[in-house]
Image (spheres, helix red, strand yellow):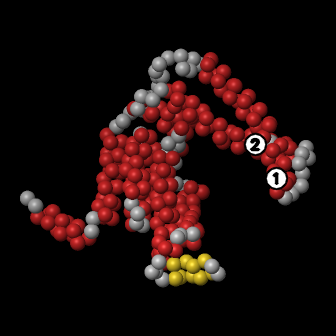
Amino acid sequence: MTAPALRLATPAPSFLHRLNPLAKVAAVVPAWIALLVTRDAAAPLLLLLLAVVLLLAGCRLRGRALVLLLVGVPVGILVVSVGSAVWVDPGRASGTDVLVVAGPLRLTAGALLLGLTTALRLAALLALGLIGGLTTSGPELARALTAQLRIPYRFAYAAVAAYRFVPRSAAELTLIRQALRIRGVAPGRGPIAAVRRMLSGVVPLLASSIRHADRVALAMESRAFGAHPRRTERVPPRWRTADAVFTVAGWAATAAVLVLVLVPVPVLVPVLVLVPRLP
């Protein structure tokens, strides 16, 4: 009775979680390239909206992640827009209305538009990266790289092991600082005491990292990791029809955004009117 209850309580994976990790990367690569080659605010705005809608519909965000997406991203866009507009070269925004004057700083409408374009481009790059980042784990990406792209599994899983070191090192550093605080090492406040506490934790953290790396290497060697040219998977990742459809849909969405942004409206409207009349 326990196993069926646990299976019923476990939520089913979302649409994006079920896709191949490489499909989620391949679908957004043209959008990343488009963000680098376009210079107006329309393209990053449209791509950002598409990425946010896809995350809300296919990722099942909750709690902190949902607040970060719906509140943190707009606030970050506002802050980066104003911060970038303040330092824009006045020659690039000459001839536009002055919005705010604060001493030597002048905020013009043209500078604010340039800052908004930069902020939207950064936000769109981040949102497109979250499509795969929030729905793909390191081992899943490593398995897909070794299965579909034939990357040597030694490199892929070594990268996963290195990535796992980051959160573990952060937790270890917190424990070291707590132990030093209990023992009264480098007490006090201010920047000097903060630097002393940081330096006092470097050597214990380095020793702990070396010990952990030695244990990981010993565990991998005892399991004959790297002894064979190929690694077998219990559940090998597959490239399914849904992955191909998602990839093509991402490319088509990027192409549609570029057409809407780059093609002039007087040229686009007659084409849209004549297409339904073609035999």
Give residue 62's position: percent from left, percent from top.
55, 55
The residue labelled by disc 1 is 194
The nearer-to-camera label among 1 and 2 is: 1
Residue sitting farthest toward the front: 91
The residue labelled by disc 2 is 173
What residue do we see at 75% from left, 35% from top?
Answer: 206
Give residue 53's position: percent from left, percent from top.
43, 59
Q: Is residue 170 left or right of residue 97?
A: right
Q: Is residue 107 above or below residue 279?
A: below
For residue 64, say whether it is visible.
yes
Task: Tell me if mark 2 has few (under 14), some (14-19) or many (20+) residues whose alpha carbon lies within 10 angstroms of its own.
Answer: some
Q: Is residue 249 left or right of residue 89?
A: left
Give residue 118's position: percent from left, percent from top.
49, 64
Q: Amino acid at mark 2?
A: Leu
| SS assignment at label 1 | helix
Give residue 227's position: percent from left, percent from top.
53, 16
Q: Nearer the viewer, residue 132 or 98?
A: 98
| SS assignment at label 2 | helix
* Quadrant that contains the N terminus: top right
Q: Amino acid at mark 1?
A: Ala
Q: Nearer the viewer, residue 110 or 95?
A: 95
What residue do we see at 60% from left, 38% from top?
Answer: 163
Q: Is residue 10 left or right of residue 209?
A: left
